Amino acid sequence: MAKKRANGEGNIRKRKDGRWEGRYTAGHDPVTGKQIFKNVLGKTQAEVKEKLARALVEAGQIDFTKAGQYTVGTWMDTWFENVAKIKVRPSSHQTYKGYIDNHIKPSIGNIPLEKLTTMDLQKFYRKLLTKGRVERIESKEQPQGLSAKTVRNINQVISSAMDLAVAQKIIMTNPTNACELPKVEHKEMQTVPAEQLSAFLEEAKRSGVYEMYYIELATGLRRGELLGLKWSDIDWKNGIIKVRRQVARVNGEIVEAPLKTKNSYRTVSISPQAIEVLREQKRKTNDQYVFPSPNGGPISPDSVNNMLKRVLERAGIPKVRFHDLRHTFATIALQNGVDIKTVSGMLGHFSAGFTLDTYAHVTTSAQKEAAQTMGNVLSI
């Protein structure tokens, strides 16, 4: 016979098979209005009493009219369409969608959302690290596993979606919170050595892209910011560039997009020499963009990378990324006495502390030189 309990406490009874069962009300069906009943089972009355107590606590934190409706895959799609598309920069939409469609849904998409565990995620991440790369022609010669950074990015996407599920009372806790993530190995920063810059710019001139790479090395703009420059952003009189937008590839199309952060919206002072380089570029173009594509309009970021690779090869300079030209600007500026706060503002970093951490190797060298100088001055 069921043991009567106060309203909201559920009730406990012994079943014919010898096990004990605790039943409780977990809410009401939004369509029929009928009560939703749940149960817990155990070998002893004490065991069921403990399980029932936990279940009643969970019932107060879970909306059972929503729970059970989603798999991990359907919830990731729901989160992407209703949250990520609004919250995340348009240039990141394709990346997030790729994580969901190429990795998350094929591996753990069919797991009921409320049953996803930390261990499910740990196994998933281990798989990504060993053989997670999507098979494409251009990735045949690359390692089969994804990088630690990419796995951490995927975890962050899942975590954001799980946070929303917790807020919506669909799950009790976020299973990513207890995950052990792979450590990202610090890669040595690459720059174009100062003694090779002349050779680099000479080859860029022969290749017809001198002005673009000169302005990049003179300003340290992000690639998308450089390609998004319009002539209306140039203050010729005061020698200032206004950084207001970026060019990015979104869903396969080259489009204008908002900048990375609020600090990215900035003004950057340039030298008279850079102004002359821009005047020469203006004489060569008839487009609103400073560095347009051959057919007009914004140029593809990919084509800029390909051209950089060719210029470096022809100049006999080791391969670097376009972003490394930005590092080259910052490194040379710091080595030549420009203060960290000024460099940070020109780069559009969110804080001088971040710039200091990024270029610690440069500032440490400068500090050693300063210490040696002081040592020489104070010697008697």
Image (cartoon, grey):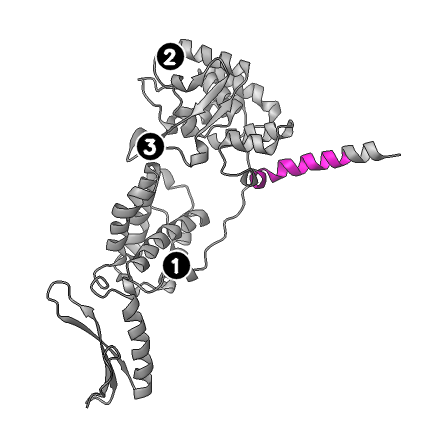
Residue 347 seen by the camera: yes
Amino acid type, label 3: Arg
Q: Which residue is mark 1?
A: 176
Q: Nearer the viewer, residue 180 or 282?
A: 282
**Number of residues whose C-alpha sits closer than 10 Å to that of mark 1, classed few (under 14), some (14–19) or many (20 or more):** many
Q: Position of residue 93 (x, y in %)?
A: 31, 41
Give the image quarter of residue 69: bottom left
Amino acid type, label 2: Thr
Amino acid type, label 1: Thr
Sequence-wise first label, 3 or 2 = 3
Mark 3 vs mark 1, foreground winner is 1
Q: Which residue is mark 2?
A: 285
Q: Nearer the viewer, residue 32 or 201?
A: 32
Q: Secondary structure at mark 2?
A: loop
- Image quarter where the C terminus lies is top right
Q: Is residue 356 left or right of residue 302?
A: right
Give me the residue at 54% from left, 24% from top: 316
Q: Which residue is mark 3?
A: 249
Q: Magenta span has 17?
A: no
Main secondary structure along the magenta-highlighted residues: helix
| Residues rendered magenta in the picture | 356-372
Q: Position of residue 250 (x, y in %)?
A: 31, 34
Q: Position of residue 9 (x, y in %)?
A: 26, 79
